[in-house]
Amino acid sequence: MKPGLLMVDDDEAIRTQMKWALSQDYDMRFAEDRGGALEAFEASAPAVTLLDLGLPPRPNECDEGLAALSDILAIDSTAKVIVISGQSEKRNALQAVGAGAYDFLCKPVDVEELKLLLRRCIYVVELEREYRELQQGQRSDVFEDMLGTSPQMQSVFTFIRKVAGTNAPVLLLGESGTGKEMAAAAIHHRSARKDGPFVAINCNAIPESLLESELFGHEKGAFTGAHVQRTGLLETAGGGTLFLDEIGELPPAIQVKLLRFLQEQRLQRVGGRQEIRVDTRLVAATNADLKELIDTGKFREDLYFRLAVVTIRLLPLRERGEDIVFLAREFLQRYAAQNGQTKMVFAPDALRAIARYSWPGNVRELQNRVKRGVIMASGSRLTGKDLELGQEQDVASSATSLKQGREQVEREMIQQALKKNSGKITSAAADLGISRPTLYELMEKLGISKERANTNNN
């Protein structure tokens, strides 16, 4: 079946030309103005839309075309729209790309260049469709709230599947906010212990004087204030899993008792003499360097080896590639639905800010910023300002000379690519591995024209 193509242009001659040039490969629909474009888009859901910026009732201006683009993206934020403009309107075309258009072409349109661009666009549409289908397939394979499509996270999921069916202790390593407790819960819920309790404790959140009693329990009269016998968390989690977060904060005396429990599966309550057998699996986590703590005598090496039978490292969000935007969209969908805003989408500046930010707080920070952004957004588009991710948080060059050096390298590479491809923007962008709009933006920033690039390289 031919992919759908909607062309929005008030010039009948151009519509006829495009029909003859493209109808063999595409199921074409046509519209002459903004209203007709929205009606045709909703009716046919085309794979690609070709949108002239100059539309009635002001064909000599771009406001109607930009408004049509905004309306189309409001209907479907993933829509692929290629805008068409005159040479004098190139800045408006770049503005359209910044607002969410897939790409742009300048008039008069080179039909062969248009065909190449359409093929690439359709290829992206197919990849995105397959990606969504893959996500739907993976969504049935639930890891609690753990989400991720990157190879790094798929590796983590594989480790969880393998280790969940055993009783081996697991050590989870990763920065704060990377999802260590969710990973521990996933291990528990995929294990034979899933019907037993899952108990979590942050070893850094409980005073040292109370931590031993919290973990091992105490007998009545064991210390001042111990008016009744109390069961510790190791016993409470019997038949299930105990998750010890920030294990590196355990005091030395408690490390000794925990090591004995791991060796014998027995414990004594504080003030007690009777040994109690407990069937509890331990999953521990830390954002500290345990080997460094071992070297400084703050953590027992024998306890480390008992805990780290299996080690799973959870990468920081900044190292998870495409997962960043994927997770952001998942959180946006979740929190927007909670607030009754089912059609909320990210504005382009928000997606750029999300991709550039280093996320020191990892997934937890991303989740909180999106949740706040949904509350603060004034319309259906969530901006970088709503996320409190402004330009001031972009990573800047630390030295002027470094910036100048980078620009010089970019300038030379762009000039060489343009020369090699006889000034053809589409081919040069493909050689450089960037999009045409990105190449146009770089050329404008660096003061490069096609003619000047060819002259400088001759």
Image (cartoon, rainbow, N blue to C red):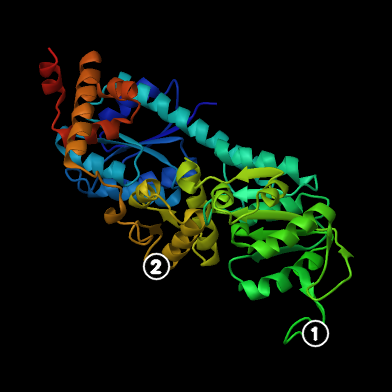
Which element type, helix, strand or loop, lies under badge 2? helix
Q: Nearer the viewer, residue 98 or 302?
A: 302
**198 relative to 25 in the view: left or right:** right
Marked residue nearer the N-terminal end (2 or 1): 1
Which residue corresponds to the image point at 35% horizontal and 44% vertical from the top-left?
100
User: Residue lying furthest top in this view?
Assistant: 458
Q: Amino acid at mark 2?
A: Met
Which percent across, then down, holds residue 264? 84, 55
Q: Is residue 448 left or right of residue 43?
A: left
Q: Position of residue 409 (x, y in %)?
A: 22, 27
Q: Residue at x 78, y 54 (%)?
A: 262
Q: Which numbered marker is on residue 376?
A: 2
Residue 289 percent coordinates (x, y): 54, 50
Residue 405 lies in quadrant: top left
Q: Is residue 12 visible?
A: no
Secondary structure under tag 1 reads loop
The part of the image, by quadrant, that contains residue 86 is top left
Q: Quadrant of the C terminus?
A: top left
Look at mark 1 in the image and give the residue it sits on: 221
If the image is split into quadrants, where does the N terminus sit?
Answer: top right
Could one spot residue 36 in this view of the protein?
yes
Residue name at image x 43 percent, y 54 percent: 360
Q: Nearer the viewer, residue 323 or 402?
A: 402
Tag of residue 425? none
Q: In the rendered picture of this protein, how many numbered marks are placed on residues?
A: 2
Q: Is residue 438 above or below residue 263?
A: above
The amino acid type, in three-letter code, at marker 1 is: Gly
* Label 1 packing within 10 angstroms: few (<14), some (14-19), many (20+): some
- How many C-alpha atoms fall within 10 Å of the one at disc 2: few (<14), some, or many (≥20)? some
Q: Nearer the viewer, mark 2 or mark 1?
A: 1
